[in-house]
């Protein structure tokens, strides 16, 4: 099932800029990242994994034990362009992790079953 978030104007604009070989304008990239992070949190509700896409946002998601203090044991971190690619299916999750484009730590940090959105 496709999320309406990936069809939003801001996500489309960011992907179009990337397809044209341009870097999306900062506000467009920020809003696209946040839109797709929100979609992930809706698809995988919970608080056991923290997904970070600096400098634009972070969400907690995935069912399991809740983390409340200090550094979370389950963390996913990537750059904004890679996040757009894995969230929309343009880059395979496992491939992104293997290539080091996505950094993961913790036993629950595999988002493969939730992506693409």
Image (cartoon, rainbow, N blue to C red):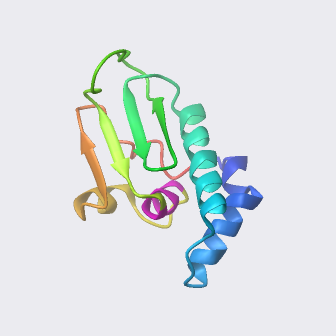
Q: Where is residue 11 in the image (x, y as percent from the top left)?
A: 66, 60
Which of the pair 17/108 is nearer the observer?
17
* Magenta-drawn segment: 81-87
- In terms of depth relative to the viewer, which is nearer, 68 or 108? 68
Q: Nearer the viewer, residue 24 or 49?
A: 24
Q: Which residue is drawn at 39% across and 42% down?
A: 111
Note whether 91 is above or below 77 in the view shown: below
Q: Is residue 67 above or below residue 28?
A: above
Which residue does the image show at 61% across and 41% down from the upper left? Answer: 39
Spot occupied by residue 99 in the image (x, y as percentages of width and height): 25, 65
Main SS category, magenta section? helix
For this orientation, the residue located farthest to the right is 9
Q: Residue at 65% across / 59% down in the picture? A: 27
Examine the rendering and report whether any part of residue 60 can be seen. Answer: yes
Total tally of numbered discs in the picture: 0
**In the image, residue 18 lies at what x, y percent?**
57, 76
Instruction: Name which residue lies at 59% across and 61% down.
Output: 29
The percent position of residue 78, horizontal first and vertical second, equals: 37, 53
Q: Does the magenta stretch include residue 106?
A: no
Check residue 86 for magenta coloring.
Answer: yes
Which residue occupies the foreground of this view, 5 or 112?
5
Q: Does residue 109 appear in the picture of this structure?
A: no
* Location of residue 93 by image quarter: bottom left
Q: Which residue lies furthest to the bottom in this view?
A: 20
């Amino acid at each position: 099932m496709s999320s309406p978030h990936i069809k939003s104007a801001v996500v489309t604009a960011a992907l179009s800029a990337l397809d044209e070989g341009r870097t999306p304008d900062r506000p467009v990239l920020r809003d696209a990242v946040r839109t797709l992070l929100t979609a992930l949190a809706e698809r995988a509700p919970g608080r056991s994994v923290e997904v970070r896409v600096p400098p634009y946002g972070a969400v907690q998601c995935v069912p399991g034990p809740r983390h409340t203090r200090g550094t979370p044991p389950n963390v996913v971190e990537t750059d904004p362009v890679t996040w757009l690619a894995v969230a929309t299916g343009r880059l395979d999750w496992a491939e992104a992790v293997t290539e080091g484009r996505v950094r993961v730590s913790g036993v629950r940090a595999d988002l493969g079953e939730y992506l693409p959105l």
